Amino acid sequence: MEESGVMKNSKKPNRRSNAKYPALDPKYNLKSRSELIEADYIERLSDSEKDWLNRFNEEYVNANFKHKGATIQKTKAYKKDSYHRNNARNRDILTREHAMGHNVHLDDNVSFNPEKEIIEKLDREIITKKLKKK
């Protein structure tokens, strides 16, 4: 608490906040974004270029406009586009499955039937409950 009795609004520092260029390292980002930020040429960039690319990734990929340093784009349309891309990525089933480590291919899901999947899941839950009662 501060002297005025009001708690500070800052978060506890974590590994990501302590990293110099967190938006350039996939291990400091969500798994759903890791494919978008991987670049094999980062070691060859200067510090100023890394700083710019880090800020760009924060805005374009992570939809974070409250990052360290100056913002690259300040228009409402750019922010809206970044938020839209991020939300669409979060809604995408294949991206979510990939982030959970499941190896999913479109060819495997051609005959995907959500109703059948729900029924099978409910059946498994019912069977599990009956087995636990015995």
Image (cartoon, rainbow, N blue to C red):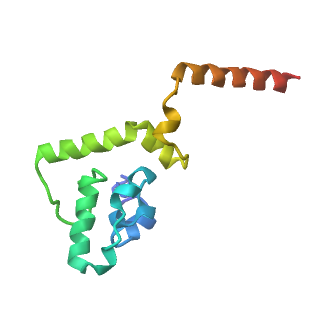
Q: Is residue 102 visible?
A: yes
Describe residue 94's horizontal placement relative to residue 65 as left or right: right
- Figure quadrant of residue 87: top left
Horizontal side, residue 4 vs residue 13: left or right: left
Residue at the spot x=39%, y=38% of the render?
Answer: 92
Q: Tell me which residue sits at (33%, 78%) in the image.
A: 43
Please provide percent x and percent y for residue 46. 24, 80
Quadrant of the frame with the N terminus: bottom left
Quadrant where the C terminus is found in the figure: top right
In percent of width and height, residue 133 lies at 84, 22
Q: Position of residue 11 (x, y in %)?
A: 40, 58
30 or 106: nearer the viewer = 106
Query: What residue occupies the far front of the structure in this picture?
Result: 107
Residue 8 seen in render: no
Identify the image quadrant of residue 128: top right
Vertical arrangement, residue 125 with respect to residue 28, above or below: above
Q: How many marks?
A: 0
